[in-house]
Image: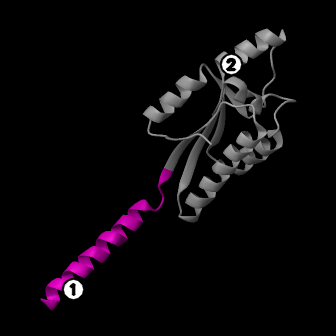
Amino acid sequence: MKNLIAAAAFATGMTFAAGAAWAEGQTHHIVFHVDENDPHVMNMTLNNVANVTSYYAAQGDTVVAEVVAYGPGLNMFVVGKSPVADRISAMSLEMEGLTFAACGNTHRKMSEKAGHDVALLDEAGIVPSGVVRIVELQQQGYAYVRP
């Protein structure tokens, strides 16, 4: 009986150790959604990105994160209007695997309304549709976060 209990304890320990080893080095894919022209929401989003990245880095994991903005949230990426432009610039240099996606539909409408091409931060790439981009990333297995 002692041998059976010892064997069970050993097997449980080995399963736990194998599970822990398996978890090390994972890559976590996360999409963050911003659709509000609210500096608090934009900063909270960037805080979430930084916190998640730090959490997983402490476990030996990596994070691939994309911040997708559309509608009023696109102001997060507009030159001269973004209340978080400096943070975006710093974070994009410090965090490998972090990208920013601007909705092409919203950008086109903003530009038409302004009568000129609205300049976006260099860090932001334009995707055809912010909503479609979020859907595509979720279909690829990305976790979805909306602060």
Separation of marks 2 and 1 at Cα, in angstroms: 63 Å
In this image, 114 relative to 100: left or right? right
Quarter of the image with the C terminus in it: top right
- Residue at 65 percent of width and 38 percent of height: 99
Tell me the kind of residue under disc 1: Ala
In this image, 58 relative to 25: left or right? right
Q: Does residue 44 belong to the magenta stretch?
A: no
4 over 99 or under it: above or below: below
Circle 2 crowding by C-alpha within 10 Å: few under 14, some 14–19, many from 20: many
What span is in magenta?
Answer: 1-27
- Inspect this view and state whether residue 71 appears: yes
Residue denoted by label 1 = 6
Image quadrant assignment for residue 13: bottom left
x then y, percent, for residue 117: 80, 15
Local SS, label 2: helix
Q: Disc number at residue 106?
A: 2
In this rendering, the count of numbered labels is 2
- Residue at 66 percent of width and 26 percent of height: 70
Main secondary structure along the magenta-highlighted residues? helix
Q: Nearer the viewer, mark 2 or mark 1?
A: 2
